[in-house]
Amino acid sequence: VRTIGIIGGGQLGRMLAMAAARLNFRTVILEPQADSPAAQVANAQIVAAYDDEGALAELARAADVVTYEFENVPVAAAMTLTVARPVYPPPRALEVSQDRLVEKRFLRDCGIATADFAAVDSQADLEQALDRFAGVGILKTRRLGYDGKGQRLFRSPAEDRAGAFAALGGVPMILESLVPFDREISIIAARDRDGTIACYDPAENVHRNGILHTSTLPAHVNETTVDAARKAARAILENLAYVGVIGVEFFVLPDGGLVVNEIAPRVHNSGHWTEAACVVSQFEQHIRAVAGLPLGDPRRHSDCVMQNLIGKDIDDVPAWLIRADVLVHLYGKTEARPGRKMGHVTRLLS
Ligand code: ATP
Ligand code: MG
Ligand code: MG
């Protein structure tokens, strides 16, 4: 492998391209937005829609292997590419993670606990599902939601349900039972082409306004919970015959039990800490896996806290830069719109 094609030009693609360059790989980005964060550091960018047939053919010619930085790559595009080049992670991972209903069924088939759920295709379905969940649950669009977008929480049976289906766009949805979790953790894991698996330690994640705010290592969970999280990640990777890095989000119940919230078939925001606290980051790990190199050691040499810089948080960068214990990473975005991920900082604790 000399050249790695990456579908998607956001910050995750950017960090993958940076890790690839360090191992002597060239990168080509497929992304419709010109001068994307990833293209600023990659060797080349094909500026076209993700499903543009000419662009996909060009990507297959330019790259020896193709990967992606986001889970909404059209499955048909990924399938088209597999005819010409290996595509990692396998397109099946896209199918599973693009639709919350398919994802939950897949997880259950792997023997992994999820929130209780019901498919909601109409207002009548919603009323019926809410009755089943005693009026409490989270309604989510099945596709395309991120950072808590496309969701509506029903806290009590007294809440007004009228028009709720239409208000979220009248698209296929899922109602999930509200999981009474103590905390949220995630596992970043990798599987190489030979089937070897490496898991990083679980991070404890705190969200603000639906967006990841901090990931802290170690997570405040016991060894049994850590083992269960690793076991679930392993089952998912093996079931998908996966190659690359995956992020698995969990709810931790008061008794230490785990419920999987969702999976992301890519490097994950809650794994950014690995670049500061591990010898091999999740980005290099992904590049190693898809390029057919041996995986790196996922052990953590330091405790740490990763914090996202959202919108105006970018103004704090001068203060972060003068700290000896902080690694600053910025994404090359010029406009600091509210809710936009501009960069992150990782503070080492030990
Ligand atoms: P991401 O940016 O992580 O992809 P998303 O838009 O896919 O976010 P989810 O991860 O499904 O959204 O939910 C966002 C947050 O809402 C969760 O991290 C959790 O805090 C809360 N949440 C979601 N589903 C449930 C649930 N069934 N029970 C309790 N809390 C939930
Ligand atoms: Mg999500
Ligand atoms: Mg999530």
Image (cartoon, rainbow, N blue to C red):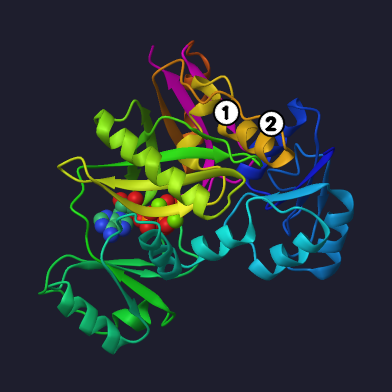
Q: Position of residue 260 (x, y in %)?
A: 34, 52
Q: Can you give x and y, in whole percent of width and height, for residue 262 in the image?
A: 40, 55
Specify the quadrant of the image occupied by residue 212. Answer: top left
User: For residue 348: magenta?
Assistant: yes
Residue under pointer 1? 281
Task: Please name whichever residue, 241 or 312, is drawn nearer the observer in this view of the structure.
Answer: 241
Residue that carries the numbered disc 2 in the rendered image: 19
In the depicted view, which residue is nearer to us: 267 or 39?
Answer: 267
Name, please, the residue furthest toward the left: 158
Task: Give the quarter the ligand 2 occupies.
Answer: bottom left
Mark with earlier residue (2, 1): 2
Residue 309 visible to an observer of this rendering: no
Q: Position of residue 243 (x, y in %)?
A: 62, 46
- Residue 233 lies left or right of residue 127; in this view the side is right
Query: What span is in magenta?
Result: 325-350
Seen in the picture, residue 218 relative to 11 is either above or below; the reply is above
Q: Amino acid at mark 1?
A: Ser
The quadrant of the picture occupied by the N terminus is: top right
Residue 196, horizontal then vertical, whole percent? 57, 36
Could you tell me which residue is drawn at 25 percent across and 65 percent down?
A: 116
Give the answer, above or below, for where 33 lies relative to 22. Answer: below
> Which residue lies at the image location 58% right of the left edge and 49% below the top edge?
242
Mark 2 vs 1: CB contact within 8 A: yes
Task: Label 1, secondary structure: give it.
Answer: loop
**Quarter of the image where one finds residue 136:** bottom left
Which quadrant of the figure has residue 87? Answer: bottom right
> In the rendered image, is residue 24 in sight?
yes
Q: Residues within 10 Å of mark 1 (few under 14, many from 20)?
A: many
- Is 312 included in the stretch rendered in magenta? no
Label 2 crowd bin: few (<14), some (14–19), many (20+), radius 10 Å: many
Q: In which quadrant is the C terminus drawn?
A: top left
| In the rendered image, the vertical position of residue 66 relative to residue 169, given as above or below | above
